[in-house]
Image: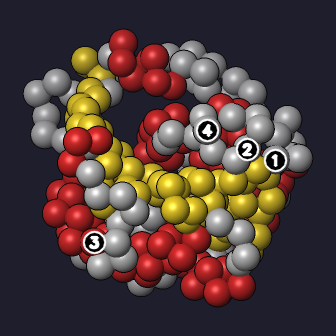
């Protein structure tokens, strides 16, 4: 059983103190990804189930499959989903992405993922957290190859990644015929360079539809910008 929790407005996220935790990256993606018109959604590497639950709250007509390669993470996601008002919308599966892509007959309007990205960092001694943080378990190439198989012809994939990986993302995604349609550069403060990028890709390459935005999170320590508050206000109890 989890030994800590984070309370959102409409659901609670329980988590293991030594493993997956609630982070700004997941909250950003869950609040930003374009889920309004999506009927079928896939959350890859669901962890605690946070993003799946946020998307279910935003679109209560959507059905969401949430997968994770780690058994403990999948079990924790099940606990969180069943304790939420959105249990009928979300199905959690313990399964690696490559196997899921091979056996899945569904096609998705939206795929979301907060993927592992600490490619060059030292690995965490905790195996579960290390699995969630390192591209050994899921490379960008594997992610985009699977997404191309699983998306509908008009479907989109939305990710949160380090901002300095933008060029790599474009290059790797193009090999699977996926192209950037929207990106939002996330700055910690007004004077800092972007640390994260929220990025949406689709199978349609159209420069006319490309949208680029910038989001600043804090004006000062724990003093959030109006834009960040507007994006996340339906989830946090208080800002």
- For the residues marked 3 and 1, what is the alpha-carbon distance in whole angstroms? 32 Å
Dot 2 or dot 4: first in sequence order is 4
Dot 1 or dot 4: first in sequence order is 4
- For the residues marked 2 and 3, what is the alpha-carbon distance in whole angstroms? 28 Å
Task: Relative to 82, say whether 8 is above or below.
Answer: above
On screen, residue 58 versus residue 137, left or right, reads right
Dot 3 or dot 4: first in sequence order is 4
Image quarter for residue 216?
top left
Dot 3 or dot 1: first in sequence order is 1
Dot 2 or dot 3: first in sequence order is 2
Image quarter for residue 48?
bottom right
Q: Secondary structure at mark 4?
A: loop
Instruction: Kindly tell me whether residue 164 is visible in this rendering.
Output: yes
Viewer-proximal residue, 4 or 213? Answer: 213
Q: Residue at x 42, y 73 (%)?
A: 144
**Residue 34, x across and y down, in percent:** 51, 39
Say which mark, if any, is on residue 57: none
Q: Secondary structure at mark 1?
A: loop
Q: Can you say which quadrant of the picture contains the N terminus?
A: bottom right
Which residue carries the number 3 mark?
174
- For the residues marked 3 and 4, what is the alpha-carbon distance in whole angstroms? 25 Å
On screen, residue 119 versus residue 31, left or right, reads left
Viewer-proximal residue, 27 or 17? Answer: 27
Whether label 1 touches label 2, CB < 8 Å: yes
Q: Secondary structure at mark 3?
A: helix
Say which mark, if any, is on residue 37: 4
Would you call the spot at circle 3 few (<14 residues within 10 Å), some (14-19), or many (20 or more)?
some
- For the residues marked 2 and 4, what is the alpha-carbon distance in whole angstroms? 8 Å
Which residue carries the number 1 mark?
89
Task: Relative to 167, say whether 217 is above or below.
Answer: above
Q: Residue at x 71, y 85 (%)?
A: 103
Which residue carries the number 2 mark?
62
């Amino acid at each position: 059983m989890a030994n800590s929790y984070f309370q959102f407005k409409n659901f609670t996220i329980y988590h293991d103190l030594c493993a997956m935790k609630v982070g700004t990256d997941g909250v950003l993606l869950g609040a930003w990804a374009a889920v309004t018109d999506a009927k079928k959604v896939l959350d890859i590497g669901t962890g605690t189930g946070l993003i799946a639950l946020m998307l279910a709250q935003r679109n209560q007509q959507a059905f969401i499959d949430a997968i994770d390669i780690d058994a403990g993470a999948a079990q924790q996601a099940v606990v969180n989903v069943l304790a939420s008002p959105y249990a009928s919308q979300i199905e959690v599966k313990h399964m690696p992405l490559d196997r899921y892509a091979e056996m899945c007959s569904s096609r998705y309007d939206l795929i979301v993922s907060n993927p592992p990205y600490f490619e060059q960092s030292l690995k965490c001694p905790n195996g579960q957290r290390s699995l969630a943080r390192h591209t050994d378990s899921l490379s960008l190439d594997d992610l985009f190859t699977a997404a191309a198989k699983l998306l509908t012809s008009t479907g989109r994939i939305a990710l949160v990644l380090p901002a300095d990986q933008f060029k790599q993302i474009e290059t790797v995604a193009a090999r699977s015929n996926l192209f950037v349609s929207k990106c939002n550069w996330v700055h910690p403060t007004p004077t800092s360079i972007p640390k994260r990028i929220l990025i949406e890709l689709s199978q349609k390459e159209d420069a006319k539809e490309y949208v680029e935005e910038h989001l600043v999170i804090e004006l000062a320590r724990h003093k959030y910008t109006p834009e960040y508050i507007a994006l996340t206000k339906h989830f946090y109890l208080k800002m």
